[in-house]
Each structure stands twice: as structure tokens, then as C-alpha cells.
Image (cartoon, grey):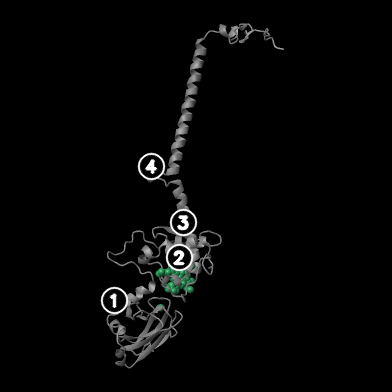
């Protein structure tokens, strides 16, 4: 039982409190010896020194914190006046560079044999032209073409370009990272220089002769603006050649040849000699032909490639265009009226497919 006084019967609450005893001692006083010590001048000086040190430590700590905050701030968002790049942007740039360099290897391995090592065109159309890169060859278009194949471009079901993306139907050989790398490569700016790397090791490739690291530049000129009033590049690349064949611009290269070439077969009756050239499977099946020298003659050009445009463009040994025939899609034939050529050998090619070549001998 506690020492709470018991309630007597009939007594009401509140119960009376037990008496409170006052605390017996002064509990928080220092020992008399301490109290006896006076504040000597040395002690006062020490206290002053200590507190001054403490203030210094505090001050320096604050300076360190402020400096760290400021430096980290600039590290993160970029230095004032653009002296350094923001951290995340720098990371993005580094990743972009890696993607472009990987895309270069994917292109060389898969695309260069048809589109040329520098995208200058060959069996497939040119890809590195500014007028095409400006808007036509945008990221979405490239992604769609690589997932759908060449038939997407002009609706040609027999297009030579297969499906590349493994998400296509049927699946192609390239995964989505390779597709994105390819797009990054095709859209890379010409203002940047990239390193050619070994596809397997990722190590820079060194030129064995000069000992220098091999590099390449992007294709897209960021400063390019289409000429005012120019029409956008057509959705189907063969339209470019179909439209050009009628215009004077195309025949400008060979003023004497083109008007007749575009026109009447009757003209062929005027000259005796007819040279037959056939294009089939993106190649001239007649790469060596002979024509009479110093007299106009007729090329009977047979394009056997369905919906694929070809022509015959004759150059001289200096590379100057001597004659440029109309470009037209197959299957069709056309007769080109060619002006007189001096005796000699003349390389000829297809304007659309620069890797279709042959030699014409005038004798
Ligand atoms: C077998 C040859 C061949 C290969 C290899 C090839 N292409 Fe093509 N490519 C073509 C042809 C031909 C066309 C034209 C499409 C058509 O109308 O048939 C074309 C069209 C294109 C176009 C559309 C061009 C335009 O003007 O609209 C793009 C983009 C393209 N190819 C990218 C690529 C890429 C990237 C690769 C490598 C992964 C590649 N090609 C590999 C033959 C090829
Ligand atoms: Cu051709």
C-alpha cells in the first residue's frame, strides 16, 4: 500500500497531498575550488584565442561548403559564359559520338556496297546529298525505310533493298540499336570529326602508313538551306529523274544530244549506225561497245529493270560529259541520238547508278 492517506468513510475527493520536502542541497553548483579560481589574464587570453579559433574553423567550413556548392552547381549546369558544357549534355554528346561511330561501321558493313562508301549512291540512290538530307532523309523516314525495306520508297515490290530492322516483316538482320546507330550516322553533322573504330574492339583504327588515327566527318551540313523557291525532294527518288528528263536542266550537259534523244525515233533513220546497249540487274550487259568515229550515231538503249531508272552518260577521258541520255524507268527502250565523237575510248555510266559502267570505243 502507498502512503496515500486512506479516505475515511464519508470523506470526499480531492484527497489531501502528502507534504512536500524542499530539495536538501544546491545541486548544480561547481566545486568550491573552481569557484575559488579567479579569471586570470592568461585564462582570459586563452578563452579569447579558443573562441577566435572556433570562429575561424566555422568560417572556413562555411567557405568550403559555399565553394563546393558553387563548383558543383557549375559542374552540373555548365560554367558561366559557356566555358564548360553542362554535365548531362556532355554525357549526351559523348553517347551521340559513340552512336555515330558505331553507325559508321554498320553502314560500311551493310549499306556501302549499294549506296557507296560515302553515301554517294551506286545501285541504291545517293544518301549524302544536302537537298535529300535537309528534310527527306529525316529520322522517322529512315526508321520506316529500314523497317519496311526499299518497297516503302517508291512502292516497287521488287525493290533491291531488303528489310533491315529485325522488327520488320519478315525480320531483317539489324537490331534496334544498330538501326538507331545507323540513323545517328546518316544524320551526323559535317562539322564534327569522328574516329573510325574497330567494330569488334572499339579501338581507333590507325592508318598503317601515316600512323594517324583514321577519322570521318558527318554528312549533314547544318548551315545548308535549300535555294529559295525550290521544291522539296520528292518522296520517291525515281521521280527526280523522271521529272529531270523533260527539263532543259538535264539536257544542258549535252545540248546537242538531248533534244534528239528525248524525241523522235525517226531521227534514228538518218544515221546508219546503231549501237545497242542493254541494262539489266543494275549493270550494263554490254559493257564494251563500238561506235563509228566522227559521225553522229544512235544508241538503242534497252532498260530491262522494271521500275528502275537508267540511262547512258558518255564521258571523255578527262571526265567531261560528252552525252547524257534521258533517264527512264524500265522495262522500256529508247533511242539516243549521239553527236559525233572523235576516235578514242569513252567510259560510259548510268547517271542514277554510278557503279554501272562500260566503255565505248569510237573508231
Ligand atoms: C542491295 C542493295 C542495297 C543495300 C545493301 C542497301 N540499300 Fe538502301 N536502297 C537500295 C535501293 C535500290 C533503294 C531504292 C528503293 C527503291 O525504290 O527500290 C534504296 C533506298 C534506300 C533509302 C531511301 C532513299 C531515298 O532517296 O528515299 C534509304 C534511306 C536507304 N536505302 C538506306 C539504306 C541503308 C541505311 C542501308 C544499310 C543498312 C541500305 N540502304 C542498304 C539498295 C540497297
Ligand atoms: Cu541505272
- Above or below, 285 against 37 in this view is below
Q: CA distance from mark 3 to mark 1?
A: 42 Å
Residue, far front: 10
> Label 3's element?
helix
User: Which of the 4 image quadrants contains residue 331?
Assistant: bottom left
Quickly name the residue at label 2.
144
The mark lying in front, picked from 2 and 3, is 2
Direction from residue 244 to residue 219 in the image, left or right:
right
Q: Which mark is residue 80?
A: 4
Q: Quadrant of residue 349?
A: bottom left
Label 2 to label 1, Cα distance in Å? 31 Å
Find residue 255 and report its horizontal and vertical position in percent.
27, 80
Report, in whole angstroms, how far the alpha carbon at label 4 lies from the one at label 3.
Answer: 25 Å
Earlier-in-chain disc, 2 versus 3: 3
In space, the residues marked 2 and 4 are separated at their CA atoms by 41 Å
Nearest to N terminus: mark 3 or mark 1: 3
Q: Position of residue 306 (x, y in %)?
A: 43, 80
Foreground disc of the pair 2, 1: 2
The residue lying toward the viewer, choosing from 127 and 53, is: 127
Q: Earlier in the sequence, mark 2 or mark 1?
A: 2
Q: Which residue is mark 1?
A: 247
State whether label 4 is within 8 Å of ligand 1: no
Query: Which residue position holds label 3?
Result: 97
Number of numbered labels in the structure image? 4
Rendered residue at 29%/80% (across/down): 254
Neighbour class for label 1 at 10 Å: few (<14), some, many (≥20)? few
Quadrant occupied by the N terminus: top right
**Are the residues tagged 3 and 1 within 8 Å (C-beta)?**
no
> Considering only vertical position in the picture, is 323 above or below 178?
below
Q: Nearer the viewer, mark 1 or mark 4?
A: 1
Amino acid at each position: 500500500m502507498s502512503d496515500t492517506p486512506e479516505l475515511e468513510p464519508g470523506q470526499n475527493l480531492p484527497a489531501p497531498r502528502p507534504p512536500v520536502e524542499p530539495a536538501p542541497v544546491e545541486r548544480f553548483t561547481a566545486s568550491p575550488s573552481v569557484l575559488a579560481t579567479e579569471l586570470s589574464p592568461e585564462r582570459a587570453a586563452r578563452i579569447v584565442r579558443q573562441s577566435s579559433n572556433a570562429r575561424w574553423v566555422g568560417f572556413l567550413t562555411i567557405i568550403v561548403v559555399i565553394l563546393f556548392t558553387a563548383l558543383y552547381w557549375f559542374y552540373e549546369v555548365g560554367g558561366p559564359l559557356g566555358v564548360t558544357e553542362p554535365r548531362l549534355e556532355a554525357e549526351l554528346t559523348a553517347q551521340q559520338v559513340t552512336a555515330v561511330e558505331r553507325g559508321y561501321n554498320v553502314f560500311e558493313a551493310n549499306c556501302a556496297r549499294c549506296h557507296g562508301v560515302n553515301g554517294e549512291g551506286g545501285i541504291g540512290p545517293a544518301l549524302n546529298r544536302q537537298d535529300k538530307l535537309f528534310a527527306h532523309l529525316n529520322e522517322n523516314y529512315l526508321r520506316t525505310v529500314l523497317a519496311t525495306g526499299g518497297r516503302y520508297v517508291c512502292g516497287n515490290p521488287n525493290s533491291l533493298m531488303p528489310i533491315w530492322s529485325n522488327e520488320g516483316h519478315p525480320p531483317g538482320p539489324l537490331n534496334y540499336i544498330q538501326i538507331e546507330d545507323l540513323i545517328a550516322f546518316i544524320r551526323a553533322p559535317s562539322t564534327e570529326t569522328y574516329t573510325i573504330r574497330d567494330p569488334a574492339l572499339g579501338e581507333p583504327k590507325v592508318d598503317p602508313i601515316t600512323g594517324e588515327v583514321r577519322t570521318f566527318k558527318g554528312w549533314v551540313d547544318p548551315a545548308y538551306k535549300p535555294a529559295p523557291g525550290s521544291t522539296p525532294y520528292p518522296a520517291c527518288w525515281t521521280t527526280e529523274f523522271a521529272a529531270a528528263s523533260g527539263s532543259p536542266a538535264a539536257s544542258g550537259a549535252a545540248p546537242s544530244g538531248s533534244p534528239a534523244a528525248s524525241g523522235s525515233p525517226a531521227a534514228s533513220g538518218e544515221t546508219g549506225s546503231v549501237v545497242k546497249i542493254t541494262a539489266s540487274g543494275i549493270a550494263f550487259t554490254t559493257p564494251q561497245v563500238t561506235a563509228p568515229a566522227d559521225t553522229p550515231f544512235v544508241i538503242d538503249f534497252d532498260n530491262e529493270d522494271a521500275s528502275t531508272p537508267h540511262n547512258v552518260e558518255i564521258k571523255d577521258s578527262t571526265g567531261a560529259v560528252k552525252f547524257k541520255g534521258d533517264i527512264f524507268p524500265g522495262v522500256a527502250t529508247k533511242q539516243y541520238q549521239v553527236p559525233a565523237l572523235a576516235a578514242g575510248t569513252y567510259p560510259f555510266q548510268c547517271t542514277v547508278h554510278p557503279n554501272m559502267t562500260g566503255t565505248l570505243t569510237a573508231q
